Image: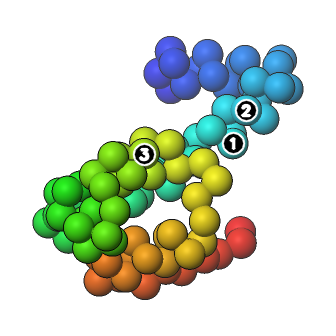
Amino acid sequence: MSDLKRYIAERKKRDKPFAQGYDEGYEQFKVGVMLRQAREAAGLTQEELARRLKTKKTAISRIENHAEDIKLSTLERVASALGKRLEIRIA
């Protein structure tokens, strides 16, 4: 385990607000990363995806870097523009 992972694990044990905020932030970060990876796998730039969605490159950047409170309808539109389908699971 890296020093960073060890620090995070220890801090989460002793600091409940940190643990909750960290987990929520990580999930939001993960959504943005998954969207970026899907876009790159489709061989598209942010600009090209923005054109397909009839929006601006800055909107795509904001979605990929700050995916908090993203609407399901937006996720569906992005998936469709990438030639994918959206799947949601509760685990």
Q: Is residue 35 above or below residue 74?
A: above
Q: Is residue 75 above or below residue 5?
A: below
Q: Which quadrant of the view contains residue 43?
A: bottom left
Q: Residues within 10 Å of mark 2 (few under 14, many from 20)?
A: few
Q: Which residue is mark 1?
A: 24
Left or right of residue 9, residue 63 in this image: left
Q: In the depicted view, which residue is nearer to us: 8 or 67? A: 67
Query: Is there CB contact under 8 Å for labels 2 and 3?
Result: no
| Residue 21 image label | 2
Left or right of residue 55, residue 19 in this image: right
Q: Residue at x 64, y 75 (%)?
A: 89
Amino acid type, callout 1: Glu
Query: Is there CB contact under 8 Å for labels 1 and 2?
Result: yes
**What secondary structure is found at the residue carrying circle 1?**
helix
Q: Residue at x 83, y 17 (%)?
A: 14
**What secondary structure is found at the residue carrying circle 2?**
helix
| Residue 44 image label | none
| Residue 62 image label | 3
Residue that extends furthest to the left in the rendered view of this protein: 43
Label 1 to label 2: alpha-carbon separation: 5 Å
The percent coordinates of residue 55 (x first, y second) are: 34, 62
Q: Earlier in the sequence, mark 1 or mark 3?
A: 1
Amino acid type, callout 3: Arg
